[in-house]
């Protein structure tokens, strides 16, 4: 807390002790202090002068809030908070106590951070979760995806009213149509309801999973996190370079655990038939149709397909 003494040291010297009196008069004649005195007429000047630092802090921070430069540049002692004064009478004497009140920007940011803490991302740009999603704006930007946005809205509404679903969604669409953005919308909306979520960018995750073969404990923790999350999104599935081990012992283990328990979501440029072909082929083993079909048996029955139409928004 900046005291009046500190404020004086920042001022150019123009008359010594007169500065303290000038600031004190300024504080006592501040509209906030006048309002405080009108609520408590018994507060006399000696009591006010005894608490001058508190009053000065209150008025200074109130003015800073009126000209708010944004939460990141908040000049107040406690970011996103302003000082208030509480007056109480004890044993016939008035006491002034200061307290901190959070501003709306701080409260909104805290709510956003609580939501963000519900979501774990692997290799996905985290700015996706800082978005303030607006369904009408998503449609306004591209009317072609209106049906997909409505399907996601309906899914969110169903989950909010009925609880966690066993069925997930498969967001299929061309490059740049907003599939990852929509997955972020889904996770954020449901995180507000208390559901935890994980989103995984598949091409990079698969490469890391290969390396984690030599770190079994870390691999186990990662797989457990994906198994246990309320909501799991595999982003850009079908674009990864699969090995038999990752397909059968990582992806297969996760999906086997989640099916009929918790919903899994996917974004992909492939339809389900093409994804099955992708799962059926690895560079090490060649084509293994039964392995691809086996994995798809843990995907196909547990998703509703959402066709994300529209133009390519990347770079626009």
Image (cartoon, grey):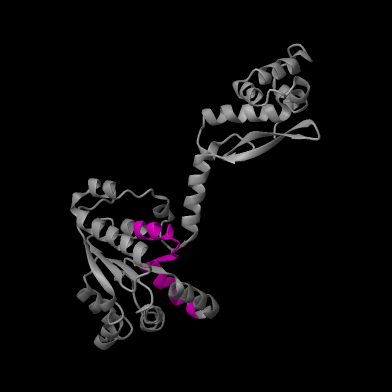
Q: Give the range drawn in magenta.
A: 185-213
Q: Is residue 205 magenta?
A: yes
Q: Which residue lies furthest to the top in this view?
A: 15
Q: What predominant SS class does the magenta segment belong to?
A: helix
* Quadrant the N terminus occupies: top right
Query: Residue 233 at what x, y percent from top left?
Result: 36, 67
Which one is in front, 152 or 9?
152
What's the residue at 29%, 50% (across, down)? 135
Q: Can residue 79 be seen in this view?
A: no
What's the residue at 45%, 62% (across, down)? 194
What's the residue at 50%, 76% (across, down)? 219
Q: Is residue 7 visible?
A: yes
Q: Residue furthest right?
A: 91
Which one is in front, 33 or 127?
33
Query: Residue 37 at what x, y percent from top left?
Result: 66, 23
Looking at the image, is 115 positioned above or below residue 227? Answer: above
Q: In which quarter of the view is residue 307 placed?
A: bottom left
Query: Residue 65 at what x, y percent from top left?
Result: 54, 31
Q: Does the magenta stretch include residue 238?
A: no
Looking at the image, is 59 positioned above or below residue 189? Answer: above
């Amino acid at each position: 807390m900046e005291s009046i003494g500190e404020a004086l040291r920042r001022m150019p010297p123009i008359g010594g002790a007169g500065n303290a009196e000038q600031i004190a008069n300024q504080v006592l004649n501040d509209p906030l202090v006048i309002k405080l005195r009108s609520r408590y007429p018994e507060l006399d000047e000696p009591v006010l002068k005894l608490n001058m630092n508190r009053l000065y802090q209150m008025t200074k921070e109130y003015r800073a809030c009126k000209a708010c430069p944004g939460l990141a540049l908040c000049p107040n002692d406690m970011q996103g908070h302003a000082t208030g004064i509480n007056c109480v009478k004890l044993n016939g004497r008035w006491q002034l106590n200061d307290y901190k009140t959070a501003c709306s920007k701080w409260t909104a940011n805290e709510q956003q951070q609580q939501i963000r803490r519900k979501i774990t991302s692997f290799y996905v740009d985290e700015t996706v979760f800082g978005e303030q999603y607006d369904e009408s704006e998503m449609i306004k930007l591209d009317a072609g995806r209106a049906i997909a946005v409505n399907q996601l809205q309906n899914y969110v509404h169903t989950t909010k009213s009925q609880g966690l679903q066993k069925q997930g969604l498969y967001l299929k669409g061309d490059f740049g149509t907003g599939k990852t953005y929509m997955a972020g919308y889904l996770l954020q909306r449901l995180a507000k309801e208390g559901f935890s979520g994980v989103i995984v960018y598949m091409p990079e995750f698969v490469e890391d999973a290969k390396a984690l073969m030599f770190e079994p404990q870390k691999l186990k923790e990662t797989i457990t996190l994906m198994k246990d999350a309320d909501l799991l999104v595999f982003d850009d599935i079908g674009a990864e370079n699969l090995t038999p081990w990752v397909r059968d012992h990582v992806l297969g283990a996760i999906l086997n655990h989640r099916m009929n328990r918790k919903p899994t979501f996917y974004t992909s440029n492939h339809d389900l038939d093409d994804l099955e072909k992708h799962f059926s082929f690895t560079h090490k083993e060649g084509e293994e149709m039964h392995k691809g079909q086996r994995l798809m048996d843990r995907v196909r029955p547990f998703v509703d397909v959402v066709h994300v139409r529209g133009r390519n928004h990347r770079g626009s």
